[in-house]
Image: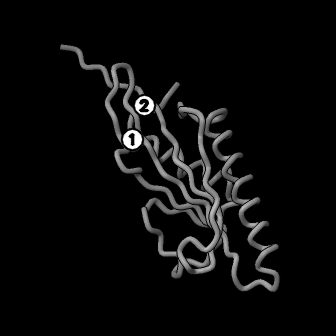
Amino acid sequence: MATSSIKETIETIEDVLTNQFSDLIKSVSFEKFANTTKDKDYPKCSFYFAEGGTQIQSNTNVCTLSFEFLDAVSGRENKVLRTKEVVSDMFQTASMFVNYLSDQSRLDLTYPVSIETFDNKYKDGLGGVSFTLTINIIRPCLSM
């Protein structure tokens, strides 16, 4: 059964990240441009409303959220090896997260989910992955 509101959807995602992925993700924020220099708790997940992120359809409403899973690349002796580790780890974490949402939560996801890898995206030594989830929300019924 799908969630029934955008608020419930966001709260479900925050709960999953905070409680089910706390060993893999140390910091979670619901903001488009997370302050990556202020918060040094990595790995980190930042998520926010995607552009054009909500739609009303005939049987469901749709909410689209963008995600970034980030970890520190710089500050290590072998930056090339560390970049490979960070991108690989964040890809694996994102994959497990999407699978968990699909299998264990009340979220109805639309597939496929494309994941983009990056290193040094914000020029502050962070690497990881970004992706967008399209989530179907139960359309409210009004009786007249």
Q: Which mark is residue 15?
A: none
- Residue under circle 2? 137
Between 140 and 82, the residue placed more toward the observer is 82
Between 10 and 94, the residue placed more toward the observer is 94
Between 69 and 15, the residue placed more toward the observer is 69
In the rendered image, residue 128, in percent from the top left (x then y), is placed at 65, 63
Figure disc tally: 2
Q: Could you tell which of marks 1 and 2 lies nearer the N-terminus?
A: 1
In the rendered image, residue 111, in percent from the top left (x then y), is placed at 58, 33
Q: Residue at x 43, y 62 (%)?
A: 31
Give the answer, above or below, for where 46 lies relative to 105.
below
Per the image, label 1 sits on a secondary structure element best described as: helix
Residue 10 visible from this viewpoint: yes
Give the answer, above or below, for where 70 lies relative to 12.
below
Whether pointer 1 and pointer 2 mark residues with C-beta atoms closer than 8 Å, the reply is yes
- Residue under circle 1? 6
Q: Residue at x 58, y 61 (%)?
A: 45
Residue 23 visible from this viewpoint: no
User: Which quadrant of the view contains residue 27?
Assistant: bottom right
In the rendered image, residue 90, in percent from the top left (x then y), is placed at 70, 59
